[in-house]
């Protein structure tokens, strides 16, 4: 087990290098330099000072040398300062991360808590009215773009009904509020983003849970359980569900990176102070250090998510757990 | 006394939106304490018969279109959900063909047997449950402690099948249906498992319905043999009558097709052709296209059943006028 873990952790190193290398290369292939905003927009900047500026940031060296320098600093967990405002990239991320985590943990929890029961119920009562209604819902969830739905709901709840705020995470007078008003204020701001970001995920995952459950219900061991006179609830929620939920664990692990990611379109619409917008703005400004910091943290989380999924899976499935004994 | 009386049972499966008639007006009875082998080629409906008795034809697979099954004096098709549950595992048990798929892969074997006990003895506490499950494992000759906490994948095929049998007999049912219980096992293990059935029969007074495609096994282990073809019962009788004096040309061919070690040479016959497509309505005898003694009438009219005591055959050759 320990061997396996060490092996897996060592494997992440070349992967991480590969991912960051590609990100770095792409950022440098894209036209435009970070210094352009400071120099090209200003007619009074001479060609000479442009070169000086580039040298200051180390941009005059070939890109692979720049990457090597970045990698050396990355080894010391130094993500460098933003080209845009000179603040440490890691600090900029630390500001945005809690908001992203809050939104995504809520939405992911909501997705799993709702999708699994819906999937199981749809499978058990296959072709019932509920199952058919869910099929329509899933179809809608897959085909309706989240940003469009977001706009519609913002119009309905924010403008027409005036029930919910439509942007940001806090109201303007947040700092003057007491604790409970703050919680209430934040919750109100979170409702629309959470519901909308959960909507599409819910559609996919409930479908997945349904098909996994349907598959299990056809297995011989379910017939055996019936033949032994076990109560139906026990058969469905224990004998079948325990098998059907195994693949869901993998999906849960794969959705861990989404915890910090989040869509930038989505965050832009809601003016939500999350990581998605930070990454997008950094890309647009060619703010290399921030882009690389966001990218490598996302990559690290993805690899970690995969590892956690595999470990959980092994823990949950005795066929894997006992393989090497 | 008859423990099981099946009369005019018809079952249809759905396959590609076509109805496949897996059982056609099948009637059969099993006396309390006897052992009956149901033999036939794969696809002849013998497993469907076993599933019907346990009420295990799942709604998405197919349905029972007609007939009655009387189990121990009760009409089981009138059963409520709870009555079915009380029958399954408690009064009748079933062992399936493939021990690799019939046990739940993520639950320890002991817990699965315990659940079977608990289902019918809700008053028992944890310790008593465990004891009963252990007894059951001992009954099938498995060393309890080690097997108890094992997951199915940690056991051999033979051990798994024994564990499945332990679960099926945990509540001492009167009828045990074994649906091709040894087909997916090694030959040496097959004998052990079949010996186990003999032992259980003697010790627990089980009535056994052994579904198999293997005529020698049927002849060795069972008192009576029922031969099925294309969803119908074509010959039924005491083992001695069926093996030594088979009447239906299909039974004859089935017995003749068994390879024998001693008489080397070309004596063993294999039957030409395939069993009929059950989604098509058959007029006349369903065996007629493959029958070496086919007559004109066989292709036009369904053959009559000739009955006498513990024997019946469905064939024109043995109609009243010729017998």
Image (cartoon, rainbow, N blue to C red):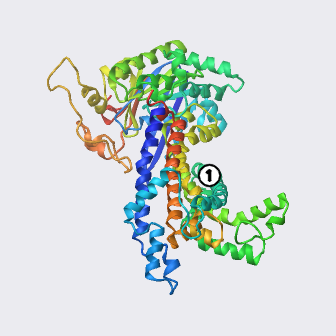
In percent of width and height, residue B61 lies at 49, 46
Instruction: Please state which of residues B170 and A202 is positioned toward the viewer in this rendering.
Output: A202
Of all residues, the one furthest to the bottom in this rendering is A43
Q: Residue at x 33, y 28 (%)?
A: B323
Number of numbered discs: 1
**Picture layout, residue B203 above or below residue A175:** above
In percent of width and height, residue B127 lies at 67, 19
From the viewer's perspective, is B237 left or right of A161? Answer: left
Q: Residue at x 41, y 68 (%)?
A: A28
**Picture layout, residue A293 above or below residue A269:** above
Instruction: Please state which of residues B115 and B315 is positioned toward the viewer in this rendering.
Output: B115
Q: Quadrant of the N terminus of chain B?
A: top right
**Circle 1 residue:** A112
The answer to which quarter of the image holds residue B192 is: top left
In percent of width and height, residue B176 lies at 51, 25
From the viewer's perspective, is A157 left or right of B12? Answer: right
In percent of width and height, residue A2 lies at 48, 33
């Amino acid at each position: 087990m320990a061997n396996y873990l060490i092996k897996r952790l060592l494997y992440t190193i070349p992967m991480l290098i590969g991912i960051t290398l590609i990100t770095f290369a792409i950022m440098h292939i894209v036209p435009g330099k970070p210094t352009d905003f400071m120099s090209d927009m200003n007619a009074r900047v001479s060609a000479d000072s442009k070169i000086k500026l580039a040298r200051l940031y180390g941009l005059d060296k070939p890109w692979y040398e720049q990457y090597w320098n970045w990698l050396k600093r990355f080894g010391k967990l130094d993500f460098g300062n933003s080209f845009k405002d000179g603040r440490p990239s890691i600090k900029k991320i630390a500001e945005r991360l809690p908001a992203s985590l809050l939104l995504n943990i809520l939405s992911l929890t909501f997705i799993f808590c709702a999708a699994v029961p819906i999937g199981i119920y749809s499978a058990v009562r296959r072709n019932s009215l509920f199952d058919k209604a869910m099929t329509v819902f899933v179809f809608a969830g897959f085909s309706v773009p989240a940003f469009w739905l977001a706009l519609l709901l913002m119009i309905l709840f924010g403008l027409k009904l005036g029930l919910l705020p439509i942007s940001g995470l806090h109201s303007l007078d947040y700092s003057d509020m007491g604790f409970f008003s703050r919680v209430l204020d934040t919750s109100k701001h979170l409702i629309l983003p959470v519901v909308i970001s959960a909507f599409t995920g819910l559609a996919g995952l409930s479908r997945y849970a349904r098909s996994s459950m349907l598959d299990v219900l056809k297995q011989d061991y379910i017939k055996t359980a019936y033949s032994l006179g076990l109560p139906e609830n026990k058969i469905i929620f224990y004998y079948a569900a325990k098998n059907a939920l195994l693949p869901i664990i993998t999906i849960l692990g794969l959705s861990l990176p989404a915890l910090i990611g989040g869509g930038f379109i989505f965050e832009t619409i809601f003016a939500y102070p999350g990581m998605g917008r930070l990454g997008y703005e950094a890309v647009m400004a060619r703010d290399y250090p921030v882009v690389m910091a966001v990218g490598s943290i996302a990559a690290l989380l993805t690899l970690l998510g995969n590892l956690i999924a595999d470990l959980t899976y092994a823990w949950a499935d005795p066929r894997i757990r006992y393989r090497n004994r | 006394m008859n423990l099981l009386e099946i009369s005019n049972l018809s079952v249809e499966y759905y396959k590609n939106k076509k109805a496949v008639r897996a059982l056609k007006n099948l009637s059969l009875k099993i006396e309390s304490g006897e052992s009956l082998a149901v033999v036939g080629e794969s696809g002849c409906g013998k497993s469907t018969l076993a599933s019907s008795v346990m009420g295990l034809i799942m709604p998405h697979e197919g349905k029972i279109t007609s007939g009655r099954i009387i189990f121990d004096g009760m009409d089981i098709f009138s059963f409520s959900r709870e009555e079915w549950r009380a029958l399954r595992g408690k009064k009748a048990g079933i062992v399936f063909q493939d021990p690799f798929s019939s046990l739940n892969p993520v639950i320890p074997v002991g817990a699965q047997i315990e659940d079977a006990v608990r289902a019918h003895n809700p008053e028992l506490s944890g310790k008593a449950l465990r004891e009963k499950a252990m007894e059951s494992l001992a009954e099938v000759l498995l060393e309890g402690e080690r097997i108890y906490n094992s997951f199915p994948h940690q056991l051999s095929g033979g051990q798994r099948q024994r564990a499945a049998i332990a679960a099926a007999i945990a509540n001492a049912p009167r009828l045990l249906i074994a649906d091709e219980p040894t087909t997916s096992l090694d030959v040496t293990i097959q004998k052990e498992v079949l010996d186990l059935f003999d032992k259980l029969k003697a010790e627990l007074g089980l009535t056994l319905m052994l579904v198999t495609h293997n005529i020698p096994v049927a002849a060795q282990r069972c008192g009576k043999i029922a031969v099925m073809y294309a969803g119908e019962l074509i010959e039924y009788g005491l083992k001695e009558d069926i093996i030594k004096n088979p009447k239906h040309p299909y039974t004859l061919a089935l017995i003749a097709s068994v390879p024998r070690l001693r008489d080397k040479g070309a004596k063993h016959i294999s039957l030409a052709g395939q069993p009929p497509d059950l989604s098509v309505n058959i007029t006349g005898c369903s065996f007629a296209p493959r029958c070496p003694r086919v007559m004109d009438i066989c292709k036009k009219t369904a053959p009559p059943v000739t009955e006498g005591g513990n024997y019946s055959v469905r064939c024109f050759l043995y109609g009243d006028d010729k017998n």
